[in-house]
């Protein structure tokens, strides 16, 4: 996958979410930026860039991101976090598939594990745009579900 292309997309999408989004959009942007930074560090320092074997460190980061995104989807009043949690689950399935079939082509594994980040960024941006549109229209847009007693 093209790191420069992804960095441009991440900068634009997460930047927009941080500037125009509500709390859930900013949380999602921060989670995605953090997961990317940790993944790059772990992958380059400990796992290499070849995707020849299951990337255990990357899979662990992806699993932590999945838990955080499920929590975001559960607490948020927005619908789009369900989508990004689902796409993150697809990335986890890619890691599991490599565990089940170690002979999986490295390029296929890399694509399956990474491709879901693109629609996740776009969905976060769409959520931020929708939030901003509601705010400009004067609509009430509560970010979080009320805590039950």
Image: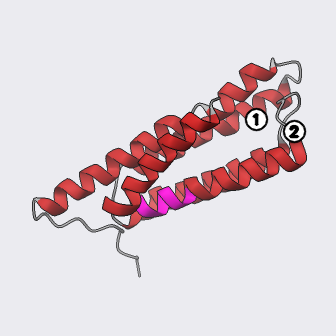
Residue 15, position as x, y percentages in the image: 42, 55
Residue at 27% across / 68% down in the picture?
142
What's the magenta region?
A: 25-31
Earlier sequence position, callout 1 versus callout 2: 2
Indicate the position of residue 4 as horizontal and vertical percent values: 59, 37
The reply to whether residue 103 is in sight is yes
Q: Where 30 falls versus 48 (above or below)? A: below
Q: Which quadrant of the figure contains the C terminus?
A: bottom left
Residue 113 locus on image (x, y percent) = 68, 33
> Residue at position x 67%, y 54% from top?
37
Residue under the point 88% across and 18% down:
103
Q: Which quarter of the picture shows residue 17?
A: bottom left
Task: Please state if 126 lies on the left or on the right of 43 as rendered.
Answer: left
Structural distance between the alpha carbons of marks 1 and 2:
16 Å
Overall secondary structure of the magenta section: helix
Q: For mark 2, what is the residue?
A: 48
């Amino acid at each position: 996958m093209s790191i420069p292309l992804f960095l441009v997309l991440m900068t634009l999408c997460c930047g927009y979410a941080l500037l125009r989004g509500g709390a859930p959009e900013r949380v999602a942007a921060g989670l995605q930026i953090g997961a990317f930074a940790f993944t790059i560090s772990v992958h380059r320092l400990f796992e290499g860039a070849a995707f020849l074997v299951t990337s255990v460190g990357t899979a662990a980061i992806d699993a932590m991101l999945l838990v955080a995104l499920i929590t975001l989807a559960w607490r948020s009043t927005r619908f789009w976090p369900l989508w990004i949690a689902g796409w993150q689950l697809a990335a986890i399935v890619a890691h599991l598939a490599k565990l089940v079939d170690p002979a999986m082509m490295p390029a296929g594994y890399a694509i399956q594990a990474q491709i879901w980040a693109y629609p996740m960024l776009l969905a976060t941006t769409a959520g931020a745009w929708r939030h901003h549109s509601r705010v400009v229209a004067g609509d009430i847009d509560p970010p979080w579900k009320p805590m039950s007693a």
